[in-house]
Image: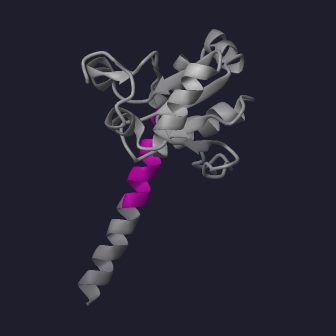
Amino acid sequence: MRGLVRDTILLVIATLVLGTAANLVPGRQLAWWGKGFEPPRAGVDFNFLDPGSADAMRTSLPGVVVLDTRSATEFGAGHVAGAEEISYTELQAELTPERLGRLRSAGAIIICGASDETDVEQLLAQELHRRGLPPPYVLIGGFLGWQGSGLPVDGGAR
């Protein structure tokens, strides 16, 4: 029993030390870690949007921008028609004044990831909202949901 308690304490300490060290690496910090920010909130920092509604918005509103957070390899294999790549881990370099200006003038921003897991997309949406943009939309189901709905895809995936 004593060994179990000791091992648990060591595991917790190791997790805290490694988590803190990982957040000290430039460009890898979690959005709210140690900065006093709250986790992203649906309805405040972003809104969810299903693939069918996203396609209707993309084709009917002027200037809708779709941002894809997947890797360059995944993006190259196929992506939402007209989408742009964006890397959350390289966000400081990606959000140039020109790109932010273009996003500010967009009719809407839709953020697409790989699948139902939307942590990165929600963090990106929160950061965009924090920089003065209207709350973006996070695509439910991500690219797999889009593709599974039979919606237009650019690149290799069909």
- On the image, the x and y values in percent for residue 64 come to 60, 20
Q: Quadrant of the N terminus?
A: bottom left
At which x and y percent is residue 109?
Answer: 60, 27
Q: Is residue 128 above or below residue 40?
A: above
Q: Is 23 or 143 nearer to us in this picture?
A: 143
Which residue sits at x=47%, y=50%? 20
- Could you tell me which residue is drawn at 61 percent across and 13 percent down? 99
- Is residue 12 depicted above or below 41 in this figure? below
- Chosen colour scheme: one colour
> Of all residues shown, which one is farthest toward the bottom?
1
From the viewer's perspective, tell me whether residue 14 is left or right of residue 59. Answer: left
Does residue 125 show up magenta in the picture? no
Residue 27 seen in this snapshot: no
Overall secondary structure of the magenta section = helix
Residue 102 place in picture, x, y as percent: 65, 13
Which of the 4 image quarters holds residue 100? top right
Residue 32, percent across and down?
60, 47
Which is nearer the eye, 121 or 35?
121
Residue in view at x 42 percent, y 35 percent:
113
Determine the residue located farthest toward the top in the rendered image.
98
Q: Nearer the viewer, residue 13 or 74?
A: 74
Res 94 seen here: yes
Q: Quadrant of the C terminus?
A: top left
The residue range painted magenta reads 15-27
Please identify the quarter of the rendering in which residue 60 is found.
top right
